[in-house]
Image (cartoon, grey):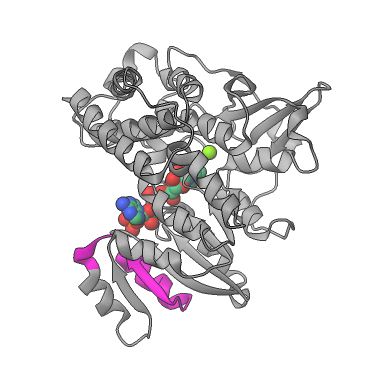
Amino acid sequence: MRKISVFGATGSIGQSTLDLIARAADDYHVVALTGGANIDQLAKDAIRFRAEVAVTCHDHLLPDLRDRLAGTGIEATAGDHAIDEAATRYADWTMSAIVGAAGLRPGLTALRHGGTLALANKESLVTAGPLLKSEAAGHGARILPVDSEHSAVFQALVGEDIGAVEKVTITASGGALRDWPIEKLASATVEQASTHPTWAMGQRITIDSASMFNKAMELIEAHEFFGLPSTKIDAIIHRESLVHALVGFRDGAIMAHLGASDMRHAIGYALHWPERLDLPVGRLDLARIGSLTFSEADPVRYPALRLARDVMEAGPLAGTVFNAAKEVALDAFIARRIGFTDMARVVETTLNKMFAQDGLAMDDIRLEDIIETDRIARVSAWEAVE
Ligand code: NDP
Ligand code: MG
């Protein structure tokens, strides 16, 4: 039996992961499930999968979670420290699907006991890529990509030499507002930015798709994950979201990865790697689909992509600043304190301010440096919001 834990179990990726686990429940022993406010779902899943421990990040919800799990023998715990403690419990395979920088610490802790970390939480790699990779290498652990584009690149690279790669291109749907006139974008509401044309995802990543901050994060994620320079990584608009990524090689060949827009593919690939097993995802009927379209991402419409390039060139702590400022800008937009196009302004202002200081390009980065940089960047970003 494989021991598994799911961090962010109550979210969109977490639920898709549990859907796959449920289909072969006898093959898995669930160690830990973690969630946030949705303790109803957390308790139900903990009971359904007979988890050892269920953890909510909210301390005040502990009594309620305990009540729901009373008499089941399942431990209930709460708080960030409890999530981290759950990550110290050995699992062969851990899904990192908490949203935001909060996913970093449990991911790092899980890597320290070896095993596989299936990484949906792209914020970890953007915030602390070198640290995650060195922890994995130092403990014989493996990080597998779950973000669909990165899973696609990873699959296209099987048996290939990374030195032969000329260009990695990840695709973007263009998000909820892709057909809006650019002048109207400033007035886009939270609701308007929260509907994705092709993927069903959590609200934060859906808004990030509309602003293309999600794709910007993914460019940095690809840079960290595959160790490629920014000049070899690109994003292209592909409205149908059926081609997830393309890898171009030095001989002119391009390997494209196609599949239904269903995260269970990338999650299932990471779950069963290096094997491929049956997955309950739709099959593409290309003759029916007829045509696939591609176009350049407009840099005026999507300033986030330009900022991502600056970040890749500036060094790892720039990723920490970028992620922190982006999270603040998104919080401020969701709270209706700034407009849609102000998000890029807040991130750019924060980056410029922090680029002006020393230290963003340092190589040997410790967790404390990242936490401190993240803290300062958030303060600076809130100043830019005001
Ligand atoms: P959701 O918002 O749907 O789920 C987030 C999960 O994290 C929930 O379990 C939530 O609990 C929990 N959570 C929220 N805040 C905290 C916190 N401070 N500490 C601990 N747990 C917390 O997000 P998604 O599933 O959409 O995304 C998860 C991650 O995967 C993100 O990093 C995202 O960028 C990435 N990703 C998602 C994709 C998708 O298709 N959804 C595609 C590719 C990557 P609760 O809901 O109970 O409050
Ligand atoms: Mg993606």
Residue reaching furthest right?
251
Of the 4 image quadrants, the one containing the N terminus is: bottom right
Q: Is residue 147 left or right of residue 73?
A: right
Closer-to-camera residue (176/340): 340
Q: Is residue 20 above or below residue 342?
A: below
Q: How many marks?
A: 0
Q: Is residue 232 visible?
A: yes
The residue under the point 52% across, 57% down is 111
Q: Is residue 276 left or right of residue 310?
A: right
Of the 4 image quadrants, the one containing the C terminus is: top left
Q: Quadrant of residue 61?
A: bottom left
Closer-to-camera residue (294/139): 139
Q: Is residue 38 visible?
A: no
Residue reaching furthest left?
386
Q: Which residues are magenta?
A: 39-61
The residue under the point 37% across, 61% down is 84
Residue 267: percent from the left, percent from the top?
59, 53
Q: Is residue 196 above or below residue 72?
A: above
Q: Is residue 57 magenta?
A: yes
Residue 83: percent from the left, percent from the top?
36, 62
Residue 212: percent from the left, percent from the top?
44, 27
The residue under the point 24% across, 70% down is 62
Residue 128: percent from the left, percent from the top?
45, 40
Q: Is residue 106 left or right of residue 26?
A: left
